[in-house]
Image (cartoon, rainbow, N blue to C red):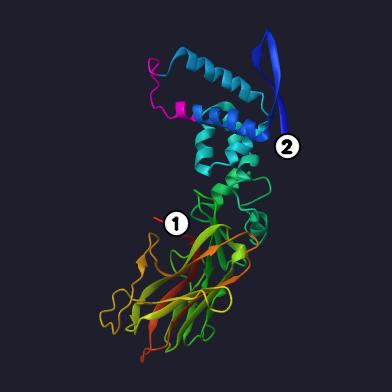
């Protein structure tokens, strides 16, 4: 609530009503939250049966609870719904009219959006996120398949639908690619299914090096993240007989560097060493996990670097199509 103490009328007492002083936490824990749970439980029944809905006393208690709820400040109810999840808020919205109004409000969905989402929207030239768009619709669009291109279309930003945590794809144009500005070695061309206007297409090189960076303050605090190289192999691929070294370093000094060997071409039969292979994605691309790191608090300021390096092979290589590095929350299974 807007204050630490709210006073409401409740409990019939000697023919009248007795005033009670409730702290904000009392209101949330004792009155609002139980009512949300009660309404949500009733709403989940597919076919209500009058004979199994509960005793008459339970029905009376539910009605009385709803009346007490109406007397509460709306920001108290919004605070409770905002402390749940986006999925729960959508479910609660369908339980009762009063919940529908509050659960869809900006006051609730402001809890689910990243605290700096306004700054991120300002980094885009898109007109889709106008000032009159509600916070709920902003959330749904940012968590949709399209997300938002920022920084001149070189970075793709989105949020996880079920958590609201931030995700980024750092496009190839924002990466350091050795010889990337030399057309003889790398070509920039559009690729069907890419989030970006163009991708980096390897013509041929001996020295393959692709670096990317992100600052932890750009990410959601209290979150474990994974970094992934997103790419494809063209029909004219060749020369990937030696595994590449992929690594991730969080912070300065290299004390947190993670390194492993991965074959970029999963179909390569002439493998000279042991190494992992990429994973297929649902969107038609492949990915290689570079490593993982944990973002502490909002003031956790450090730089995370991801590196793909293949310099051991004694042959030229080509046919690699790079979309970029994806940084997304990594959930334990």
- Measure the C-alpha gap from mark 2 to mark 1: 35 Å
In percent of width and height, residue 25 lies at 64, 35
Circle 2 residues within 10 Å: few <14, some 14–19, many ≥20: few
Q: Which image quarter is the C terminus in?
A: bottom left
- Where disc 1 sits, the SS reads loop
In percent of width and height, residue 69 lies at 62, 25
User: Which residues are the magenta region?
Assistant: 40-52
Q: Residue furthest top?
A: 15
Instruction: Find disc 1 in the rendering and name its residue.
Output: 331
The label shown at residue 2 is 2
Occupied quadrant, residue 103: top right
Confirm or deny contact between disc 2 and disc 1 (CB under 8 A). no
Relative to 197, residue 138 above or below: above
In percent of width and height, residue 55 lies at 44, 14
Which residue occupies 64% across, 24% down? 70
Occupied quadrant, residue 299: bottom right
């Amino acid at each position: 609530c807007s204050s630490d103490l709210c006073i409401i009328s409740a409990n019939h007492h000697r023919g009248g009503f007795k005033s009670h002083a409730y702290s904000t936490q009392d209101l949330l824990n004792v009155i609002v939250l139980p009512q949300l749970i009660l309404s949500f439980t009733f709403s989940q029944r597919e076919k209500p049966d009058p004979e199994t809905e509960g005793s008459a006393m339970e029905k009376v208690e539910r009605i009385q609870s709803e009346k007490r709820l109406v007397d509460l400040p709306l920001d108290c109810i919004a605070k409770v719904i905002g402390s749940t999840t986006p999925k729960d808020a959508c479910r609660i919205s369908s339980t009762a009219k009063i919940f529908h109004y509050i659960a869809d409000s900006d006051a609730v969905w402001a809890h689910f959006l990243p605290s700096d989402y306004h700054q991120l929207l300002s980094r885009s030239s898109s007109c889709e996120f106008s000032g009159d768009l509600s916070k709920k619709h902003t959330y749904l669009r940012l968590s949709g398949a399209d997300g938002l291109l920022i920084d001149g279309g070189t970075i793709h930003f989105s949020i996880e639908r079920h958590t609201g945590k931030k995700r980024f794809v750092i496009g190839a144009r924002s990466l350091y690619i050795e010889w990337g500005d030399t057309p003889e070695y790398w070509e920039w061309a559009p690729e069907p299914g890419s989030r970006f206007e163009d991708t980096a297409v390897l013509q041929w090189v001996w020295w393959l090096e692709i670096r990317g960076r992100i600052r932890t303050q750009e990410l959601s605090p209290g979150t474990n993240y994974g970094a992934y190289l997103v790419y494809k192999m063209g029909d004219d691929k060749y020369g990937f007989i030696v595994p590449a070294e992929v690594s991730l370093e969080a912070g300065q000094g290299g004390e947190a560097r993670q390194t492993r060997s991965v074959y970029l071409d999963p179909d390569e039969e002439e493998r000279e060493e042991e190494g992992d292979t990429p994973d297929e994605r649902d969107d038609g691309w492949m990915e290689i996990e570079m490593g993982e790191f944990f973002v502490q608090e909002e003031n956790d300021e450090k730089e995370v670097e991801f590196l793909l390096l293949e310099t051991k092979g004694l042959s030229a290589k080509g046919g690699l199509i790079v979309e970029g590095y994806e940084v997304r929350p990594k959930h334990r299974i």
